[in-house]
Amino acid sequence: MDKPPPLVKDIGEQGLLEKLQSFCPREIIGDDGAVIPTHPDKDLVVTTDVLVDGVHFSDRTTTAFDVGWRAAAANLSDLAAMGAEPLAITVGLSLPGDVLVSWVEELYLGLTACLQQYHTPIVGGDICRSTVITVSITAMGQNLPHQVIRRSNAQVGDVIMITGWHGLSRAGLELLLHPEVGAELNDDERNLLIKAHQQPQPRLDVLPYLWELAPEQPIAGMDSSDGLADAIAQICHCSKVGAEIERSYLTSVPSLSKVVSTEKIEEWILYGGEDFELVLCLSLDNAQKLIAKLNGGAAIIGKIIPEPYIILLDNNNIHPPQILRLSKGFKHF
């Protein structure tokens, strides 16, 4: 009996991406953005991200303003993950005809509020009718050819560092869905977590410090929008290496302990997603110098190893070594 043809859900997001990538130049795709040589001194970096109502946002947790902010932040974060300075974005908007005009205006106010921090204009786009609201952003940036962050640049001996706290966005989502969970939080703590979810900040501020420390050094990295564990796995896969992560270094803001258990905090740090921090592989010296220039939450969490697995270690010997699995992370299919 013939097997039925596979469905998208059968092969999953990564399987579908592998098929689609066969239609693209192999030397350009595979990172957070495509690097296209256009000038002897500069490369053009292009990235596209889609936000869909009911998948990436809902009116229970996200205002129109915040949808716009998050859409802009997601794409600017991809440019930051490539080491690129933003130039402009275009906006593709699909929506039903019965959406309030004020909702669309608020969406664009949110886009603009995020973009103006980085002097990045909206230069065009498209609008069409749809049964569901979809916001599709294409962002363009530029960088020097020798200053491109790639997932495939990790070297054995590099340390793995993060540019800020993880788990905050997932905690903010929990508070929006279940406000009673954060009964012990004060207003500042609650607002910090909710803002991390609704109005994340892309880490473009990290790049000037990074290029000052390592102007010619190949650097591996990506953003952690799909989860910290996913980012580490993607870097290791593309660089054909593995990683050791130290459990005691996976810390977050103290207020998370007022929301969930220690075990759940670790899960949110690794798999919560949408924190939009950068995960970078650097020499120990450069990582320490970069951390000294950044705000709280920047930390070394592990190192690159030659063996092709990702292992979670515990220097306190409370937990046995654990191979990280990505089944807990967000998957589209």
Image (cartoon, grey):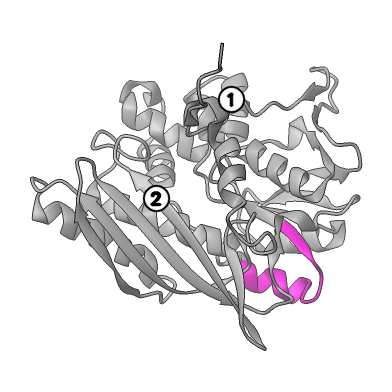
Query: Disc 1 marks which residue?
Result: 328
- 300 vs 13: above or below: below
Residue 311 position in % (x across, y down) = 81, 30
Magenta run includes residue 48 = no
- Position of residue 35 in the picture relative to residue 237 (left or right): left
Mark 2 or mark 1, which is nearer to you? Answer: 2
Residue 105 position in % (x across, y down) = 17, 60
Do callouts 2 and 1 mark residues in contact (Cβ within 8 Å)? no
Mark 2 neighbour class, 10 Å CA radius: few under 14, some 14 to 19, many 20 or more: some
Residue at 47% across, 40% down: 169
Task: Indicate the amino acid at tag 1.
Answer: Lys
Tell me which segment is drawn in magenta.
207-220
SS for callout 1: loop
Query: Disc 2 marks which residue?
Result: 50
- 166 vs 320: above or below: below
Q: Which mark is residue 56?
A: none
Residue at 90% across, 50% down: 156
Residue 51 position in % (x across, y down) = 36, 47
